[in-house]
Structure formats: structure tokens, C-alpha cells
Amino acid sequence: MTEVSTQPRVVIFDTTLRDGEQSPGATMSHSEKLEIAGLLDEMGVDVIEAGFPIASEGDFAAVAEIAKNAKNSVICGLSRANIGDIDRCWEAVKHARQPRIHTFIGTSPLHRAIPNLTMDEMADRIHQTVTHARNLTDNVQWSAMDATRTEHDYLCRVVEIAIKAGATTINIPDTVGYTYPRESADLIRMLLERVPGADEVVFATHCHNDLGMATANSLAAVEAGARQIECTMNGLGERAGNAALEEVVMALRVRNDILPFQTGIDTSRIMNLSRRVSQVSGFAVQFNKAIVGKNAFLHESGIHQDGVLKNVQTFEIMRPEDIGLYAKNIAMGKHSGRAALRAKMTELGFDLSGNQLNDVFVRFKALADRKKEVFDDDLVALMADHAANTDTDFLQLKRLRVICGTDGPQEAEMTLSIDGVDHATDATGDGPVDAAFNCVKHLFPHTASLQLYQVHAVTEGTDAQATVSVRLEEDGRIVTGQSADTDTIVASVKAYINALNRLVVRRAKTGPGDDVKTVHYHDKV
């Protein structure tokens, strides 16, 4: 018989597709949102905040499609405190087996001043909008945006109003990452003690990481009585990001002795989801990131290595396989066949079949011809490049030749396919990357500025693949691109082109100078 845990359940509310996507440059395509939502659903996330339906037609369509496809998770949409937003949100989420409306308003003095509402006017607005949402569904979440900087008496007043109006989840966000763990806990305790009906609803915590305490603040709130944590994969989110799903879940698992709570998360799926979110968002995971960073289970110190060899628990508090990392790292080579590749990719969390397997196999063979051994990280990078650069892209690199060295200026010759038509040019620059980028600008003129250019080696050795990340900004639109190749210059150009392809899509969705995200979490209500 399977033993049933009697520990209190903590609801995991993932907002990667909403708050995470608000990271500048992290916009995901429609198909990418559906894929990530499917992975979250399979992993056991209780609530998926699929988006902000009023923000754009694209956001509405994605939330509606995710709602139709979800098998287990509650599907939630965000709405501001007005009737039009709530109705639009309901139209998107009503297709779900378990729909939820999440409506919010800023309650702190600073946020009350934005719509110029008095305390009484805001209280009336909260009652009206929560009541309207509850008339549509019995699963309503209400958030007091900037709760941690709201006067306690007023916060108690509006939380009581929201509960009486029918909210079933009350979210207490640290919207600007201002609070401290002790304060986070004290705030939840105060509300549970002072607000009538508080024991009949679920209190949630939503913490930002501006001071690096999002995870600590979330766990402190749980200890005080909160039973829902709002978080994102890899801690993705505005500014310094949100509480990271992988951190709060693994903290609850590893320190169950002092945090006696359970979640429904299948932690063995964490690593695969982390990689995929990194790929589609264009935000690389820092090497020393807790839980999912490349160095999280590596030991270089001689003392550490000796200890781990004798007893892995000497310096490791969790097992790599707990999050989906497996020690088996057999190198693949040019003699490996499709069956071996499929088995290896399945082990790494990628389900390949049919045409996709054939396409990846061709890329794998090309990589194996250039590298002596192809390791797991090489295959993950290969999948990232496969997802980022397709044969249907508006811009495609056909040929690149670069001359570099101590004698300048450096030169580049390029053939670029633009909407199916090949164009060739040459250019010079201050270095081979600059020369190659100048070729792209000459063939595809644009005003986007380069905000970020990063290069990371995937594995060790001079034949290692380079993973390149590029971020561009044009008229308020921010896009990112990634690519990998054993040739760093080729990877750089492909990442640059990948970002431009995303920019082309963003241009098509918006008018000149208008960002695709026409409504944001912090906009006026």
C-alpha cells in the first residue's frame, strides 16, 4: 500500500507564463507557451497562471488554448480590478476543467495614488469586482498588490472585504521584493489572527527577489500559515525575478524536518523543465544557480572531491537524480545510431519521434563529425539550437566566411536567406563578430540596439560547443536569441538572427513603437 502523507499540502502556483514572461526580452511564442504549460501540468503544478488575457489577442489565445488542453492543473488568468478585464479573463479560462480568475489591485499608499482612489473608493471597487468574478466561477483569487507596504489596518479591511465578496484564495504579494522573512511571516500571522473568515480561505505568498530573499520570504510565509506559494521556473520574472519553483519545492523536500509540508510536484522533472524554460525565454541559467545551475552538483575542491567519493552525503544534501540529473554520461559519437540517440534524448527529458528525430539526428551527426565526443550537455545545447533556428524562419544563415587575426580590420562574407530569397554581402568590423553582425545589418537593415552578448562553453576542450545569447531592443520591444555551435562566430550570428526573427514576429503583432504587452501587472486599474 502507498503511504498517504498527513502533512499539510502547500499549493504550488506557477506564474512562469505570466509574471515570468514579463522579464524584458522573455516573450514566448504561442507554441512555446503551450509546451511549457504542458510540462508544468505533467510535473504536478497545482495552479498554472497562463497569462494576462486582456493584455493582447496573443495572450488571450494562449490562455484559452492552455485551458482547453490542461489535464490536471487549475488554469488561472490575471485581471485588473475592473469588469471588462474580469470578463475577458473568464472568456479565456472558462474552457478549463478547473478555471480560476485572479484579480488584483494595488493597496499601498503609492499604488492607491495611481488610479487616484480614496481608501473607501478602493474598498468599494474590491467588493464590486470580486463579487463579479465570484458570479462567474467559485474559484476566485484576489491579490493586494504591494501588500507588504500597505498599512496593516487597511490591509485587514480589504482582505475581509475580498473574503466576504467570495474570494477563495487571498494573495499577499511582496511586489517590489522589499520585505524580510520575519516580516513576511508576521504579516501572514497578523492577517490570520485579525481578519474574520481568514481560516476559511487559502492565503498565498508572491515574493520578488530584489533583495535576494524571495525564497526565504515565501517559506517564512508558509511557516506562518500561508498554503500557496507563487513562483516561476528558474526564478524568472520582472527585475530580479520571482521566488524560484525549484528552490521552494526542494527546500520543502530536503528540510522536511523543519518544514513539515508536502507538494504534488514530481521533482524528477525539474531539470528538463528548467532547461526548456531557459531555451524558450533566452535567459541562460547562471552556473551557480541553486538546484538547477550547471555547478550545483560539481565539486572541484580536493577536500570536497575526496569526501564525496567516500560518502556523497558529505557535501551533497540532495541527490542529482531527485531533480532529473543522472550520473550516467556516456559519450555519443559519429557511429551512434537513431535508436541510441532517441534513448539518450529520452533520458535527458526530450521526447523525439518522426520528423523531429530525423532532423535532430542529422544535426547530431554533423556535430559528431566536428567533435571527438558528444556529451549530454552538447545534446541539450543541440536541442536548444534546434528549437531556436528552424527552416521556416524569416531569416536563415546560409553561408559565413570570416577572416580574423592581428591584421585588421576583420572581414566577413555572408549569404543570408530573407523570406526564402538568398542575398550575399561582405563587411568589415572591429573583430570577427562585429564584421559578421555588420553583414546582417547590411542585408537586413534595422534600428535594434545590442543590449547583451554572452558566450558560454557547453563542455570542456577546444572543440567544445559555444552557446551564445543575444538581446536586442527596438522601440521598446526587447527580444532575445540563442544558438550553439562549435564555431563561436557561427553561434553568434545564428543567435543574432534568432533574435531578429523574434523581432519580426513582434513587429507583426504590434504597430510602430507599440510593445506587444499592451497591459502590464503594474498598469493603472
Image (tube, rainbow, N blue to C red):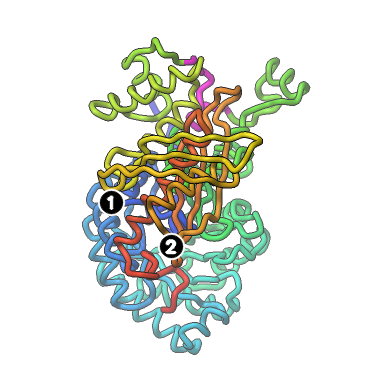
Q: CA distance from mark 2 to mark 1?
A: 25 Å
| Image quadrant where one finds the N terminus | top left
- Please say whether residue 38 is visible from this viewpoint: yes
Q: Indicate which disc, 2 or 1, sits on the residue closer to the N terminus.
A: 1
Foreground residue, 295 or 243? 295
Secondary structure mainly formed by the magenta segment? loop
Which residues fall within the magenta stretch? 319-331
Residue matched to label 2: 477
Q: Secondary structure at mark 2?
A: strand
From the top left corner, tell me how far across and down residue 197 is, in percent. Answer: 45, 70
- Please say whether residue 252 is visible from this viewpoint: no
Residue matched to label 1: 66
Quarter of the image for residue 273 reads top left
From the top left corner, tell me how far across and down residue 458 is, in percent. Answer: 54, 30
| Image quadrant where one finds the C terminus | bottom left
Question: Of the residues shown, which amino acid type is indicated by label 2?
Answer: Arg
Vertical comparison of 395 with 126: above or below:
above
Local crowd size for mark 2, using a 10 Å CA cut-off: few (<14), some (14–19), many (≥20) = many
Q: Secondary structure at mark 1?
A: helix
Vertical comparison of 206 with 337: above or below:
below
- Total number of numbered labels? 2
Quarter of the image for residue 317 reads top right
The residue at 46%/59% (across/down) is 448
